[in-house]
Image (cartoon, helix red, strand yellow):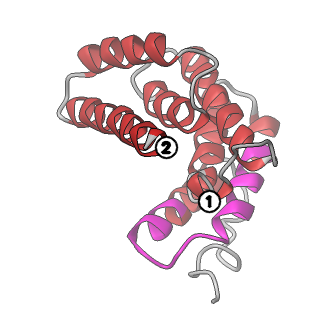
Amino acid sequence: MAERQEQTASDAVLTRIGQVVMLHHGGDREEARSRFLDLWAEIGEDGDPLHRCTLAHYLADTHDDPVDELAWDLRALSAAEELTDGRPGGDPDSVRGFLPSLHLNLAADYAKLGRAEAARSQLRRARSAARGLADDGYGAGVRSAISRLALRLGEDDGAGDEGRPPRR
């Protein structure tokens, strides 16, 4: 019974995050940032890593300053790593599909800040993580975004690797 209540509470937080994402996608960036920050205050630095990862990932997109965006994207990756590094209670499957996007966002952040080598490093990590994505709309979108950023950074677009769907 307690486990079921915990799952319901967890789902409620993810639902609330999703609602704010819709607000942001609807064009109300300032209000979305405010609500995301309120949620972050609720969840806290020691809250559920999946909640922190998801929230920080979306919160980064509401910031205009690339330094702030980078800070939130780093928080998202840090929380994701808590789920994938074998810690008790971690659930690698819950964020495995998220990792390519997390690394891609960091690569874009570093590129905005003129830190090309850090951007390329994160891009390589995104490309590697993207090999595990399904051949669906999300996977294709992430692989396409990786290729576009690689071109912007003057790298081979990796068409030999992630330009095609991963083999199954």
Q: Residue furthest left?
A: 26
In reply to whether residue 126 is colored magenta, the answer given is yes
User: For residue 78, which quarter of the picture?
Assistant: top right
Report crowding for label 2: few under 14, some 14 to 19, many 20 or more residues within 10 A (C-alpha): few
Badge 1 crowding class, 10 Å Cα cut-off, few under 14, some 14 to 19, many 20 or more, is few
Chief SS of the magenta region: helix
Q: Which residue is mark 1?
A: 93
| Residue depicted at 69% across the width and 43% down the height | 89
> What amino acid type should be assigned to the residue bearing mark 1?
Asp
Q: Disc 1 vs disc 2: which is toward the camera?
A: 2
Q: Is residue 60 left or right of residue 104?
A: left
Whether the residues at callouts 1 and 2 have beta carbons within 8 Å, the answer is: no
Residue at mark 2: 3
Amino acid identity at mark 2:
Glu
Screen quadrant of the N terminus: top left
Residue depicted at x 64% and y 64%: 130
Residue 17: x %, y % from top left: 34, 32
Residue 125 locus on image (x, y percent): 75, 53
Q: Position of residue 75 (x, y in %)?
A: 64, 26
SS class, disc 1: helix
Along the line of sight, the residue nearer the viewer: 19 or 112: 19
Depth order, front residue of 20/90? 90
Q: Is residue 149 above or below residue 70?
A: below
Question: Magenta residues, as a range?
Answer: 121-142
Q: Is 26 in the magenta?
A: no
86 up-or-down from 33: above or below: below
Comparing 94 with 163, the one in front is 94
Image quadrant for the C terminus?
bottom right
